[in-house]
Image (cartoon, grey):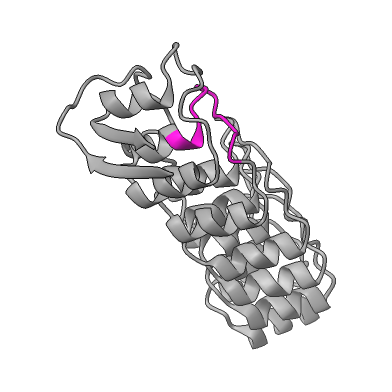
Amino acid sequence: MKKIFGFGSKKGVSPLGSASVGQKNNRIDNFLMGYHVRDRDLGKIHKAACVGNVAKVQQILFLGKNGVDDRDKMNRTALHLACANGHPEVVTLLIERKCHLNLCDNENRTALMKAVQCQEEKCVNILLENGADPNIRDLSGNTALHYAAFGDNISIIEKLLLYNANTEARNKDNFTPLLVAVNENKQQIVEFLIEKAANIHAVDKLKRTALMLAVNSESTNVVRLLLQQGIDPFPQVVYAWTADEYAYIKGFNLCLH
């Protein structure tokens, strides 16, 4: 049986040095935020979509002032902006008018990514039910499921998996959605992804295991869960450090029985 005795007082220098995704202070900016919108960047349809004005969007399309897939100066469509701002009625209208669901903005993010990023579940559901691709990657290699793992909404993750989102997709830091959830101490998300057979043995770009990331995040419950699932605390994957040695240097005491 495996038990956790808690956090110790020993603190040392991490054998990893600095890292990008792994370090909280270097986390991707605006991971759970919408767009920064400036009026001068927007066309008429984008302005109407931003504020959820269905009638105005309909009028603009009817009069031909903008096309349904027209881009603003940041390469965003009205669908991107409606999803980021949580306007499912506008999303439905745009889909009825045959907009393309998988167009990408300047960050290579789809409307689905923005809906997930902003935790707009109704928009997520509409997009997936109409054929949006959950496995497109942004410029950092993140999929919609990476964004969902960073959040707190299990039902969004469940919906993405129902539509074949890849649990083992890796971003440019080699993080899977599970590693994102572990790194951010999202215990319920970690539990759910493990239930859905996410690989607990995945390692990131710096060869850190999920257990090492849980130790780094000082998450007793996630460490306990990973040990209960049979993760190996002793693989020498980071500069010849085992997870147990890494835990010691981070001041986290693992005791295995």
Viewer-side residue, 145 vs 202: 202
- Residue 113 as seen in the image, left or right of residue 39: right
**Farthest residue in the left direction?**
9
Chief SS of the magenta region: loop
- Residue 213 as seen in the image, left or right of residue 179: left
Residue 142 location in percent, x, y? Answer: 61, 43
Which span is picked out in magenta?
200-211
- The quarter of the image holding the N terminus is top left
Residue 92 location in percent, x, y? Answer: 73, 79
Viewer-side residue, 184 vs 129: 184
- The quarter of the image holding the C terminus is top left
Viewer-side residue, 99 vs 30: 30
**Farthest residue in the right direction?**
98
Decide if residue 120 is in sight here: yes
Residue under the image location 43 percent in, 42 percent down: 183
Q: Is residue 220 above or below residue 173?
A: below
**Farthest residue in the bottom direction?**
55
Residue under the image location 47 percent in, 61 percent down: 188
Decide if residue 34 is in sight here: no
Residue under the image location 49 percent in, 49 percent down: 181
Residue 157 location in percent, x, y? Answer: 61, 62
Viewer-side residue, 149 vs 136: 149
The count of marks equals 0
Residue under the image location 59 percent in, 30 percent down: 172
The answer to if 245 sits in the magenta stretch is no
Residue 222 location in percent, x, y? Answer: 42, 49
